Image (cartoon, rainbow, N blue to C red):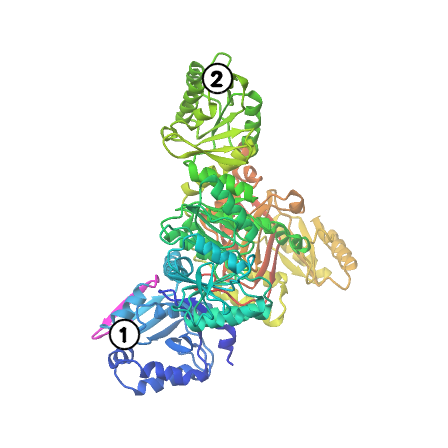
Amino acid sequence: MTDDVVSRPSVHALLADGTTVCIRPVLPSDHGRLRGLYEEMSPENLRLRFFAASRRSADTAADRACAPARPGYRALLAEVDGRVIGLAEYDTGGGADGAQKQTAEISIAVADGLHHRGVGTLLVEHLVSAARAEDITAFTADALSENHEVLRLFADLGLRTSRHFEGPEVRCTVRLDQDDTYLSAVEARGRAADVASLVPLLRPDAVAVVGAGRTPGSVGRAILHHLHTGGFTRRLFAVNPSVTSILGVPSHPSVAALPRTPDLVIVAVPAAAVPAVADECGRAGVRALVVVTAGLDHARTEALLAACRTYGMRLVGPNCLGVSNTDPELRLDATFAAEHPRPGTAGVAVQSGGVGIALLDGLSRLGIGVSSFVSLGDKYDVSGNDMLQWWESDHRTGLALLHLESFGNPRAFSRTARRVTRRIPVLTVDAGRTDAGRKAAASHTAAAATRTMTRGALFTQAGITATRSVGELLETAALFHSQPLPEGSRVAIVTNAGGAGVLAADACAEAGLALPPFTPATADELLAVLPDGAAVGNPVDATAAVSEDQLTECVDRLSRCSGIDAVIVALVPTAVAAATGDDLVRAVTTAPGRRARPVLAVRLEQDVPVRLLPAAGGGAIPSYAEPQAAARALAHAAHRTAWLARPAGVVPDLDDIETGRARTVVADHLAEHPDGGWLDPHTCAELLSCYRVRQIPWTWAETEDEAVAAADRLRGFGGRVVMKAHWPGLVHKTRHQAVRLDLRGDAQVRTAFRDLKTRFAGLMTGVVLQPLAPRGTELLAGVVQDEVFGPLVLFGLGGTATEVLADHAARLAPLTDRDVHDLITTTRCAPLLLGADGNTPVDLEALEHLLLRLSRMAADLPQLAEADFNPVLAAPGGVTVLDARVRLLPRRPQDPYLRRLR
């Protein structure tokens, strides 16, 4: 097996019509099948591919693709069910000396009858990813000018393409820059393929349940019962060799014996039988499986997934609750929840079946209902990312609710969510927030990068509304479903009991909402409609004497007030209202259509946490039992408004970066240290220089005399110097008392060196000397390469107390200009940087550039496990890294945006 095959194993991906295809390197044993690919082509297609209709070209092409590995050449094939349906190659023409060129010639062949299904495009995307990893910057291709299909393929890739015509031929050059245009084009193709692959799962024309027994109480029977009683409008079968009918549904002995091939099969058999059932379904042509069975061991799970990939079936589960689509034209309820889900507008995807049942019940009780529901279970295939793309395209979903305990590809998920959440709100429960494993982290950056911070960065950047519990998720969903978004965070509170108003005011303040005072004109208007004794501060105490009409007018006026973004009405039942027959709740729900701003009710006596009150003329008003719940929901809505209003952000170009040299530095270090580790000061400085990261001047010394000479050279930067001991693996110098500050004169330098050498005898390999830094704000900037989420950039207060102060913000790389702005402005130390109290602000442009360069370094180098810049000195005159530590690990690059199934 060649190194090429080892480094790029086979993957599965989706064609434009949702078909699963295997993309893998060519093997010598593929020669016959590749020759067959060309021999089955029509003379016309052979002519377009080889510029001549010669059958000898088939042997030549197969020989080239199956030849031993050589520098600069790569060949990938696409196969379905063992049949080769496409081949794509590139060749730089690299010689025996291994010299690598930056341009490669590319060629593509697709089997007859399979054009216009995205085979060639998918192969080229995978070649682009491989070429970038080899620092190839452009593809070239010669084609006949009449070969419109291949010319359109290049033009539609999303990459910069140029053409040069020479007679009947055209020379195409494709630049391989990975910018947002290309990623968006890949996303669009992936979205169409993904949605097409989910149609058999969520809009099947025929469903079979394997494992529905005759005895009540079995999961399979419960699912069959739900499908039958739910009114599934298409063909429904049971598979059970012992009976001919179950619950009035015709039963057959096997999947192969069914009168027609089902699109979707629900598998509810014992774990040991699951792989065989999956294989039988695949052979029969089934397109999707929902495996509710739990308890599959690793071998059975691998066999299940292999069957799904081999036969092109999408998989939900195993260990799941099922799926549902409430479309009235379908009425698919393949779950074993207690009740049928209520039709509605919320799309729901969960990993936990228990959470799924709670959400289905809560959404039905609120009247929001469900458009489609998928219990992902162990999530070996269909994921939250898939469901977001389905909801984006189904024209029925107005609200997406997720409960995900893990992420397969967070960076791809983030791009999808950023797009989807601009159309519909995406809400989640932030599950799995704790992370005890970080306690043993090495650097300050790694210690700060908690799981909560990492997930928070993902949700914040993607515009996802993250709640802390299922209850909070439902409370927020009720507001998003029923009310317009507030324009800001300014809230007016009106109450018929002063105590309730105080509780609501406290809740708003704790949630980060503002309660602005009313203008004199607004106060006068309110006093004119309220009973005597009313107080028109904010909160407005309308007193227990307020009537229904008075409260209605008060809420109307507040909802029209230009300085208010939302109104909370806190009510308690009183004998006064009962005696007069006034219904104060009706005052809140009267004519909401004329209120342009959201209105929420708080009723302390309410028996459920949240409900939607039907409003006159249609619509609903969310009513909460606790003011904290109303305030939290409103804060989430205000955050969504702010996120939608801000520009999307762009990743700025950094033209002075030397990525190639940086990769060489990394490769050379890992060649000498195969297990990785912390870089020595010289290698660290060389790597940072590739990204133009500004460090304070420094000198290395291994002897006392070298230290004195180094200090003399550095005194031109200010006279006093700092000495830091170094040995491999040392990270926290201050903690080990390995730093000597404010050294003046040769004698102090000698004394410091001797002291460090004695203290760390047998460890210390040398010292780093630096000029004593001027005054400024000490900051931390760093990055941690999370194995799941990718590189996480952290920023905040630095110095020796950085972990104690815990003033950090984080964003996932690559950073946009908006991400950098957020990192700087969301920390508590932001006023120090921006020039609070009349002080001069630090060099914000230099600080932004430092974070962008750090982000770029992490994105370029997957081997970068940690980078810790602490302290970073920020001052009006510039930003300088005083101490930098970088740790490398031997990791292969992974393209997070490459189209492939999990």
State which tag comes first along the sequence, 2 or 1: 1
Q: Nearer the viewer, mark 2 or mark 1?
A: 2
Q: Position of residue 779 (x, y in %)?
A: 59, 46
Q: Is residue 667 visible?
A: no
Seen in the image, is 168 located left or right of residue 742? left
Could you say whether the residue bearing mark 2 is in a helix, strand or loop?
A: loop
Give residue 546's mark.
2
Q: Is residue 92 above or below residue 234?
A: below
Identify the residue shown where x is 38% and y is 54%: 330
Q: Position of residue 894 (x, y in %)?
A: 50, 65
**Per the image, is 411 magenta?**
no
Predominant SS along the magenta part: strand
**Residue range highlighted in magenta:** 157-171
**Per the image, is 168 magenta?**
yes
Residue reaching furthest right? Answer: 758
Seen in the image, is 482 located left or right of residue 57? right
Give residue 865's mark.
none
Number of marks drawn? 2
Task: Name the amino acid type tagged 2.
Answer: Val
Give residue 143's mark.
1
Q: Position of residue 855 (x, y in %)?
A: 51, 55
Residue reaching furthest top? Answer: 532
Q: Residues within 10 Å of mark 1 (few under 14, many from 20)?
A: many
Q: Is residue 79 above or below residue 656?
A: below
Front residue of 161 and 78: 78
Q: Is residue 784 visible?
A: yes
Task: Name the amino acid type tagged 1.
Answer: Ala
Front residue of 395 and 744: 395
The Cα–Cα distance between marks 2 and 1, rounded to whole angstroms, is 82 Å
Could you say whether the residue bearing mark 1 is in a helix, strand or loop?
A: strand
